[in-house]
Image (cartoon, rainbow, N blue to C red):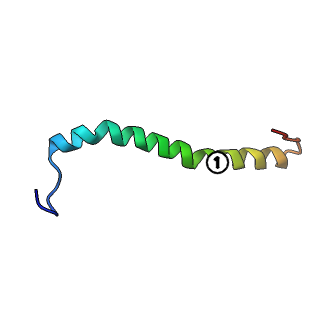
Amino acid sequence: MGLFSPPTVEAVRARRWTVFIVSILENMLFAAPLFGAAQQSVISLNGHIFDP
């Protein structure tokens, strides 16, 4: 396999579940703080006191 040749079908299928799990973990790590900040700003805009 050369440097610029595409991966084989077997290699892609072998990596599929690993990539799927890692992508979910990345989404959880990067999106959770954004959702938390948005939730706090919405609560504060509504005038409610949010004390975790």
> In the shown orientation, is residue 26 left or right of residue 49?
left
Residue at the far bottom: name it: 4
Q: Residue at x 61, y 44 (%)?
A: 32
In which quadrant of the rendered image does the N terminus lie?
Answer: bottom left
Q: Residue at x 22, y 38 (%)?
A: 13
- Determine crowd level at label 1: few under 14, some 14-19, many 20+ residues with C-alpha closer than 10 A: few
**Is residue 42 positioned above or below 5 on the image?**
above
Q: Residue at x 16, y 40 (%)?
A: 10
Q: Position of residue 12 (x, y in %)?
A: 22, 43
> In the shown orientation, is residue 34 left or right of residue 26?
right
Count of numbered tags: 1
> In the shown orientation, is residue 52 left or right of residue 23?
right
Q: Secondary structure at mark 1?
A: helix
Q: Position of residue 42 (x, y in %)?
A: 77, 46
Q: As shown in the figure, which amino acid type bears the numbered disc 1?
A: Pro
Q: Position of residue 28 (x, y in %)?
A: 54, 42
In which quadrant of the rendered image does the C terminus lie?
Answer: top right
Residue at the far left: name it: 1
Q: Position of residue 29 (x, y in %)?
A: 55, 45
Q: Residue at x 27, y 41 (%)?
A: 15
Mark 1 lies on residue: 33
